[in-house]
Image: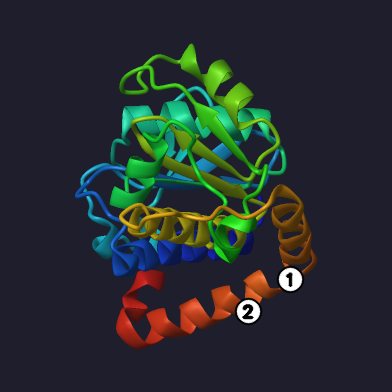
Amino acid sequence: MNVQNEAILRRDLAAAYRLAALFGWDDTLYTHFSVRLPGVEPRFLINPFGLMFEEIRASDLIVVDMHGRVVEGNADYNVAGFTIHSAVHMARADAHCVIHTHTLAGMAVAAADNGLAQLNQISAEFHQRVGYHTYEGIALDLGERERLVASLGDNIALMLRHHGLLSVGASVADAIYVMYYLNKACEIQIAASSLRGIREMPNDLSVHACEQFQACEWQRQLVWEAWLRKLERECPEYKD
């Protein structure tokens, strides 16, 4: 594998962790993001267990293979994280990056009977693009992997019932963009739940708005570059 490619992926994934800390998505040592490494043997980068998101640097990330072996690095990983991330990386060739969070809004909406509601322009981006996975306890059973990817299907995101959110993307930039706006849609839904007479968007309008968003996905890279500039101002050491 090209060493330069791995260095770029390390930088990008470390940036995602630092952004998550700035966004308030961290859950002490828990939750995890990963990115697949190019090469013949399937492997991915993931955070070492024991570091908070605000501490993670590119050099801290460890390399894990699909058998759960740490092949690069001197730290352990979150076992549930391996179950979740290996499942997606083995099943979805297009899902190069996987992001999983335990945000307050995400966990709340994941517990709602109907899941994500079509309440606003932001939620419309996810119309018929979110799967739902039934909670089975902490994801320590490798047998859950098959069921998890079946729940994800070809969607860009997954609501883990009673657990949290998961997003996937062709790049770190894509996956964190999806998570940012999915979580924002959840926050809006929680805020709107205190109102009387909530009006959901008609299905045809949700479909139309979703198509408009998909036509503008090139803008995700601009958002990513803006976020990287923010990190350069606030915590440039993430690249170390």
Q: Nearer the viewer, residue 226 or 73?
A: 226
Instruction: For label 1, count other residues whose C-alpha is less than 10 Å away and answer few (under 14), some (14-19) or many (20+).
Output: few
Q: Tell me, yes or no, whether the two marked residues, 1 and 2, touch with CB atoms within 8 Å.
A: yes
The count of marks equals 2
Name, please, the residue furthest toward the front.
197
Report x, y in % for residue 65: 51, 31
- Disc 2 marks a residue whose amino acid type is Leu
Report x, y in % for residue 186: 42, 53
Instruction: For label 2, count other residues whose C-alpha is less than 10 Å away and answer few (under 14), some (14-19) or many (20+).
Output: few
Q: Is residue 160 above or below residue 209?
A: above
Q: Nearer the viewer, residue 64 or 14?
A: 14
Name, please, the residue furthest toward the top.
143
Q: Quadrant of residue 41?
A: top right
Name, please, the residue furthest toward the bottom.
233
Residue at x 51% of width, y 64% of height: 12
Q: Is residue 234 above or below residue 178?
A: below
Q: Is residue 80 visible?
A: yes
- Disc 1 marks a residue whose amino acid type is Trp
Residue at x 31% of width, y 79% of height: 235
Q: Quadrant of residue 66?
A: top right
Residue at x 48% of width, y 38% of height: 115
The residue carrying mark 2 is 222
Residue 218, numbered label: 1
- Circle 2 — which element? helix
Q: Is residue 22 above or below residue 168?
A: below
Q: Quadrant of the C terminus?
A: bottom left
